[in-house]
Image (spheres, rainbow, N blue to C red):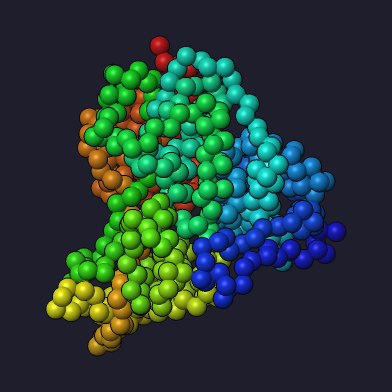
Amino acid sequence: MAARIPRVPVREQDPEIRAKNFKEVCLGYSDEEALLEAKRCLNCKKPACMTACPVSVKIPFFIAQVAAGNFAEAAKIIAIDSSLPAICGRVCPQECQCEGSCVMGVKGEPVAIGKLERFVADWSRENNVKFLEKKPFNGKKVAVVGSGPGGLACASDLAKLGYGVTIFEVLHKPGGVLTYGIPEFRLPKDTVVAAEIENVKALGVKIETNVVVGRTITIDDMFDKEGFDAVFIGSGAGLPKFMDIPGENLNGVVSANEFLTRSNLMKAYKEGSRTPIYVGNKVCVVGGGNVAMDAARTALRLGAEVTVVYRRTEKELPARAEEVHHAKEEGIQFRLLTNPVEIVGNEKGWVTGIKCEQMELGEPDASGRRSPVAVPDSHFTIDTDVVIMALGTSPNPLIAQTTPGLERNRKGGIVANEDGVTSREGVFAGGDAVTGAATVILAMGAGKRAAAAIDEYLKNKK
């Protein structure tokens, strides 16, 4: 039966229409579509999809409930392992995790696990179905630094175990990259993100915003003055990287981090915003990851003609295939095997172009990808008003610098083992603050592992 049912396509906004608005691109499954897609699942005895999920959601079990029409029971099963299902269903790279391991994908298309998770989460929100089971307060308190996916996952798991949890967030709205990084057209803020944060707060988790850990309060203060028994650092990686090429100080050069934060958190895309955003007529986005796609598609919606510049081929693009596909549908141009060497400006200090060189692929580098090599005498200039650098981010060093005994690696990340244990007793860390920029689901997995380790640590602490 399952093998004979083709994968149910998800409905989307028309590319020409969505390229001019910030409404969500994917419209999700209807009840009937979800039922049909769920019936494609083979319910494997050894489900590789579960093993490939960083938070180990019981995938075949919740899909079986969807196939039976028991949506509330499906939501209950997901809630055991994931506190952010509507978010994960939208932004997780399922194609290289759960869906990438689906047996159905060997000879055809894998089950649309992400779209089914999203369906169940959205159905639960729309029908006010919540699962807030937790143990009584056990008398111990844990501080969580950062309200991004890692912090929220750690906080919710600890709250379920009976700990008093307080999250400290540097910005005026919680959510971390979920709020300031991922655009509205991929992840709606006032409905999806806000609702899932409210579910975490409903477990008893407190969130204090506008707190700069390392300035407003230190990790030592959390132990000595606030009486916390353990601390989890999930502060993410918000320090943008640049290329260190001539012209990067010109007006019109901006990091993707700042560009997306202004657009998302400060609502700069709205007419009359008190936090304006400059886009110009032509935008070049340098980079090929998901953040580059987000910045490019945001700039397009703000009225610019957009070109993505990437030094390898499309095969090596690190962005999700779905995001690249959507970007192309919307009219974004790609200049591949192209590497910027200088940003050109006028006498007033504004960007007028980006000088590049043609590349070709050589031998594989340490990551296994073929290294780009410059083609001699191949320079050319692309006319542009704005250059958005989307080259990744690294952890902000402030917390590590103000926490004695907390070891950092050469890239600025906090040194921690698989369970989040750091060199400082009682301090745990995970997600981008440890690894550098990665994915939402990997940060959640790190937060969950750290929560289990904190529970074990506090149970055994004398």
Question: Which part of the image, by quadrant, shows the C terminus?
Answer: top left
Along the viewing direction, whichever of 24 and 138 lies nearer the viewer: 24
Q: Is residue 249 left or right of residue 29?
A: left
Task: Classify the position of the N terminus by image quarter.
Answer: bottom right
Q: In this image, 167 relative to 57: left or right?
A: left
* x and y, in percent, of residue 245 in the image: 21, 70
- The answer to whether residue 321 of the structure is visible from this angle is no
Rendered view: 54 above or below 403: below
Within the image, what quadrant is residue 169 found in? top left
Residue 78, quarter of the rendered image: top right
Q: How many marks?
A: 0
Residue drawn where x is 33% and y is 50% of the image: 238
Nearest the viewer among 192 and 220 is: 192
The percent position of residue 303, horizontal first and vertical second, equals: 42, 73
The residue at the point 57 percent across, 48 percent down is: 191
Which residue is at a point 63% across and 26% down the rendered structure image? 133
- Tell me: residue 397, above or below residue 156: below
- Residue 381 rendering spot, x and y as whole percentages: 28, 84
Report x, y in % for residue 268: 38, 59
Image height check: is 376 above or below 149? below
The outermost residue toward the bottom is 377
Residue 11: name its quadrant: bottom right
